[in-house]
Amino acid sequence: MDKTRQEMIQETVVGLLEKMGFGASVEVTAEEGDAAAFLCRVRVEQDQNLLIGQYGVNLAAIQHIVRVMLRKKTEERLNLIVDINDYFAEKRLSLEKEAARAAQEAIRSGAPITLRPMLSYERKIVHTFLAGNKEIITESVGQGDNRMVIIRPKPAEEEFLA
């Protein structure tokens, strides 16, 4: 594992949070795979709601700022997730359960199921989670804050005789 990248990520996140007035412990782990991916787990004792924000909007902004700061330092795009007090981990599980229930309902009923409006990272989690399900198709529809995922049963394939 690339220890220097992990240390640089940790220093960047700690420094940003200190400038924002938050004390935190930060642990960075590298995930093996095709592209270098890093998970930055942040633990704060108080005011986590300020850092996370409604529906994780502030946390998504912090993650974006950290990525930009790191790109300035390294000139490369790092695949990075910043998670404060396991908010994203819990959110991912919740979204995956919601998506699985909706997919089962779409298959059972044969009708499309529309999920509530979601942020882009939430829609991405749903699309990625359901990508392996061969019985359904997902698509995002709508504009801005009203963008949502529709889960449709895949139409039966017709066989043609030659």
Image (cartoon, helix red, strand yellow):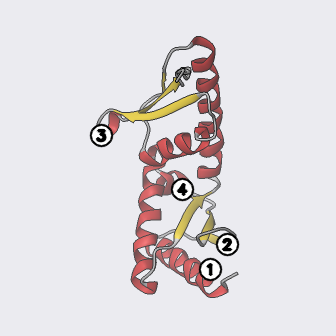
User: Which circle's residue, 2 or 1, is located before the other in the chain?
Assistant: 1
Q: Which residue is mark 3?
A: 144
Q: Which residue is mark 4?
A: 47
Q: Crowding at label 4, few (<14), some or many (≥20) Cα neighbours within 10 Å?
A: few
The residue under the point 47% across, 63% down is 63
Q: Residues under labels 2 and 4: Cα distance? A: 27 Å
Q: Amino acid at mark 2?
A: Ala
Q: Is residue 139 above or below residue 3?
A: above
Which marked residue is nearer to the observer: mark 2 or mark 4?
2
User: Which circle's residue, 2 or 3, is located before the other in the chain?
Assistant: 2
Q: Secondary structure at mark 3?
A: helix
* Residue 136 percent across, percent down from the top left: 56, 28
The residue under the point 59% across, 32% down is 99
* Residue 23 badge: none
Q: Which residue is mark 1?
A: 6
Comparing 130 with 1, the one in front is: 130
Direction from residue 55 to residue 37 in the image, left or right: right
Comparing 107 with 6, the one in front is: 107
Identify the image quadrant of residue 133: top right
Q: Residues under labels 2 and 1: Cα distance? A: 7 Å
Q: Secondary structure at mark 1?
A: helix
* Residue 128 percent across, percent down from the top left: 56, 45
Q: Amino acid at mark 4?
A: Asp
User: Which circle's residue, 4 or 3, is located before the other in the chain?
Assistant: 4
Comparing 116 with 108, the one in front is: 108
Which marked residue is nearer to the observer: mark 4 or mark 3?
3
Which marked residue is nearer to the observer: mark 4 or mark 1?
1
Do the CB atoms of the residues marked 2 and 1 lie less than 8 Å apart? yes
Q: Is residue 92 visible?
A: yes
Q: Is residue 24 visible?
A: no
Q: Which residue is mark 2?
A: 30
Q: The N terminus appears in which quarter of the rendering? A: bottom right
